Amino acid sequence: MKLWATLAVLGLLVMGTWAQGLMPTIGLPPCDSPEAEAAALVAEKFLNAQHTHGYKYALNQIDKIKIISRPDQPDTYLLELDFLETTCHVLDPTPVSQCPVRQKRQTAVEAECDFALQNTTQGLSVVSFKCKTELESFEDICLGCPQLIALNDTDGVQLIEASLDDFNKNHTFNTKFALFEIGRIASQVVSGGNRYFAEYAIIDTNCTSHDDDNCIPQNHATAIHGFCQAEGSANLNQVTCKIFDTTQAANATVPVQPPLHAHTSGPHYDPAVHSSKHHKVTRLHDPAATGLLSAESAESAELVVPKAAPVVKREVASEPANAPAADAPAADAPAADAPAPDAPAPDAPAPDVPHIQPEPLLIVLVCPGKKKHF
Ligand SMILES: *[C@@H]1O[C@H](CO)[C@@H](O)[C@H](O)[C@H]1NC(C)=O
Ligand SMILES: *[C@@H]1O[C@H](CO)[C@@H](O)[C@H](O)[C@H]1NC(C)=O
Ligand SMILES: *[C@@H]1O[C@H](CO)[C@@H](O)[C@H](O)[C@H]1NC(C)=O
Ligand SMILES: *[C@@H]1O[C@H](CO)[C@@H](O)[C@H](O)[C@H]1NC(C)=O
Ligand SMILES: *[C@@H]1O[C@H](CO)[C@@H](O)[C@H](O)[C@H]1NC(C)=O
């Protein structure tokens, strides 16, 4: 079997190159090991700190981890991680660990990311990452449920403007809030027409509650922000807004990025940060142009030393250059790993493997790790 062949060759490599001590070694800790979790949490924190619009993202699953060690260099961690959008806006100071993830029937948004981290004397830090963000397809789950509609939908925007007016008439902060960013809009067909659901972030302006014209939003870095949820229509709606505690926000330990205003329309409209219906995480972050995330193909020359679990690792098999684009709903039952010939796991060896009935191998699925949400 191919896997065995790979291991055998590696065995030879070990013998041949050990003496030189120059080859990088690769550690493959289990995806649910404390080591992997710690690295993934550093990645999660960094991702959210980079992310200046839309919602915070929570780690859902560690797909892969690989630790590359070279003599006299900090270890490099390469991780493949899945994140889910939470219901906390990025400006919400609530720690992401306390933010509920959005459920499938609310049209979940997920991000698949590759991260490169380094363990320097200062600890683990992110060097680069790349992500792609997708809506979970859920059409079949709920026919009568609210469906996401475009962030610039006319009726949705009217609900937002009307409900923000209502809120401004009725709160006790002595300022007028302006729309900062639209998070999502959904609509549902009900008897008598459409019902709209909107989520949006607000920012205080230089107007008091009574001023009416030319209200200019305060400086984003010091302004008071809040987040509103409204439903109904422009004429009849309910709105609740939560104003964020600025003292808590100011305490954020994350490096604050220069504000990137993610306007959903208008002069600063940036299609890179959101699609028509949902926000996306940063697609690529590689300030030092390390190229670490595209160096996957160089690994065949590296020495693999499984850490902790002396078992066959799926990672050892040659990896497809690109993750599968269409998400075949990943194996829901990772425990049963009896290699069913007709349904190869997404990154299993190519299906041209001859049908030799393998000896009862001890294949322990150490990766991917457990799904934390769904
Ligand atoms: C990072 O490296 C230091 C030694 O330089 C080690 O003590 C520490 O455990 C490493 N951290 C991780 C998360 O591997
Ligand atoms: C919404 O945005 C899309 C593209 O960004 C544009 O084609 C469309 O005309 C806009 N719709 C409205 C109602 O502004
Ligand atoms: C303002 O608040 C009062 C009492 O909380 C409520 O009865 C009223 O409907 C609110 N008005 C608006 C426009 O939201
Ligand atoms: C807010 O600032 C704008 C621009 O500086 C100014 O024109 C406007 O009068 C100010 N509004 C109030 C209520 O001070
Ligand atoms: C803010 O940071 C200080 C220490 O820097 C800490 O004592 C305090 O609890 C923090 N406040 C909040 C709300 O997190």
Image (cartoon, rainbow, N blue to C red):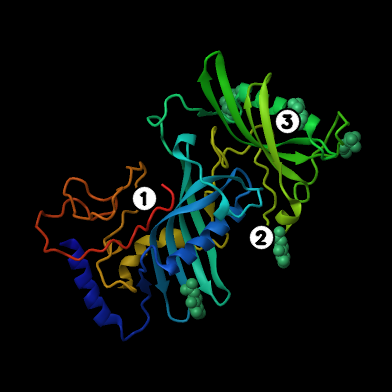
> Disc 1 residue type?
Ala
Image marks 1 and 2: residues in contact by CB distance under 8 Å: no
Amino acid at circle 3: Leu
Direction from residue 108 to residue 226 in the image, left or right: right
Structural distance between the alpha carbons of marks 1 and 2: 30 Å
Question: How far across and down, in percent of the image, does residue 151 sit?
Answer: 59, 31
Above or below 175: residue 233: above
Residue 197's x, y, as percent?
59, 29
**Residue in the image at 40% along x and 67% along y:** 33
Q: Along the line of sight, which residue is nearer the eye, 360 or 317?
A: 360
Residue 286 makes an appearance in the image: no
Q: Quadrant of residue 329?
A: top left
Q: Label 2 is placed on what type of residue?
A: Pro
Closer mark to the observer between disc 3 and disc 1 = 3
What is the secondary structure assignment of the residue under circle 2? loop
Q: Which badge, 1 or 2, comes first in the chain's sequence?
A: 2
Q: Which mark is residue 255?
A: 2
- Between discs 3 and 2, the one toward the N terminus: 3
- Looking at the image, the residue that sits furthest to the bottom is 19
> Is 183 situated left or right of 7 in this image?
right
Q: Is residue 271 left or right of residue 234?
A: left
Q: Dot 2, crowdedness within 10 Å: few (<14), some or many (≥20)? A: few
Q: Position of residue 88 (x, y in %)?
A: 60, 46
Q: Which residue is mark 3?
A: 164
| SS label for mark 1 | loop
Which-is-in-front pick, marks 3 and 2? 3
Q: Alpha-carbon distance for marks 3 and 1?
A: 43 Å
**What residue is rendered at 83% in x and 34% in y?**
215
Residue 327 x/y as whole percent: 35, 43
* Residue that carries the numbered disc 1 in the rendered image: 323
